[in-house]
């Protein structure tokens, strides 16, 4: 017994189903081509979105409102400041006036500087928590204490390496992810500022 030819309706339905799939694939291809075209022709700005901060001007403003010796160290060529802020005793939750500047180097390394005024031992202990004193470094006639993380992180956090210098009742901390030579260079500039202002 021979099999009957499929009904014309069945063949038309199969053709429509196949054509729907083809149309779907063509539509998907066209959409992908448009997306790729837009990605290729739309200009993108890959520059740094963080604008440099004029920490010298901010320090000058802070200096004009207080009699405290706000430090403004010079930085090496290629370095720039990404943040600077003055916090007076009223604004500080811990009651300690402080001056902070963040510096970024040409290889995206970071050093933060905090200068705090009329500190107490509790304030300093809080800043150095999770770190232990590992040595001292003499730089330009002043001895900086070095603190390093008790348990290092991977990647390192910004407070895993700190250098501390006490000046009368004040303290200067520098910390970050830069190389030791970068810290020593900044410490030398800070020492010059201390000699000039204290």
Image: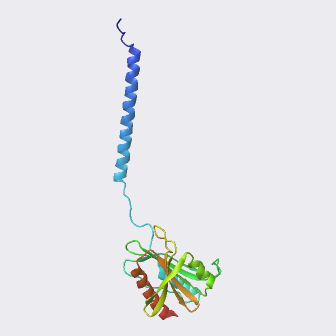
State the image coordinates of residue 12 (x, y, percent, origin top left). Answer: 39, 19
Q: In this view, does 73 lie above or below 93?
A: below
Question: How was the colour assigned to the protein in this rendering?
Answer: rainbow
Q: Nearer the viewer, residue 132 or 81?
A: 132
Q: In which quarter of the image is residue 95?
A: bottom right
**Along the horizontal axis of the image, is 24 left or right of 175?**
left
Query: With respect to residue 101, does 196 lie above or below?
Result: below
Q: Which residue is drawn at 37% across and 27% down?
A: 19
Q: Can residue 44 be seen in this view?
A: yes
The answer to which quarter of the image holds residue 117 is bottom right
Question: Which residue sits at x=57%, y=78%?
Answer: 127
Judge whether residue 102 can be spotted in this image: no
> Does residue 34 appear to the left or right of 103 in the view shown?
left
Left or right of residue 31: residue 134: right
Q: Quadrant of the N terminus?
A: top left
Tally of numbered tags:
0
Q: Nearer the viewer, residue 67 or 103?
A: 103
Judge whether 76 appears above or below 1 on screen.
below
- Where residue 53 sits in the image (x, y, percent)? 47, 76
Q: Position of residue 183 (x, y in %)?
A: 43, 81
Q: Residue furthest top?
A: 1
Q: Residue 41: x, y in percent?
A: 34, 53
Looking at the image, residue 24 lies above or below residue 138: above
């Amino acid at each position: 017994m021979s099999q009957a030819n499929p009904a014309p309706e069945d063949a038309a339905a199969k053709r429509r189903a196949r054509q729907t799939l083809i149309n779907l694939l063509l539509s998907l291809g066209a959409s992908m081509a448009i997306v790729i075209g837009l990605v290729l022709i739309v200009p993108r700005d890959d520059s740094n979105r963080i604008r440099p901060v004029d920490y010298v001007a901010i320090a000058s403003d802070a200096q004009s409102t207080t009699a405290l010796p706000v430090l403004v160290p010079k930085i090496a060529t290629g370095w720039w400041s990404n943040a600077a802020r003055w916090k007076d005793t009223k604004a500080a939750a811990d009651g300690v006036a402080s001056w902070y500047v963040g510096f970024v180097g040409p290889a995206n390394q970071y050093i933060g500087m905090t200068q705090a005024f009329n500190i107490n031992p509790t304030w300093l202990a809080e800043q150095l928590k999770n770190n232990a004193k590992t040595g001292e470094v003499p730089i330009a006639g002043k001895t900086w204490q070095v603190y390093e993380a008790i348990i290092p992180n991977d990647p390192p956090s910004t407070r895993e390496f700190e250098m501390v210098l006490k000046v009368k009742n004040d303290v200067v901390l520098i910390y970050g992810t830069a190389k030791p030579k970068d810290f020593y260079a900044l410490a030398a500039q800070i020492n010059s500022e201390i000699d000039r202002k204290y």
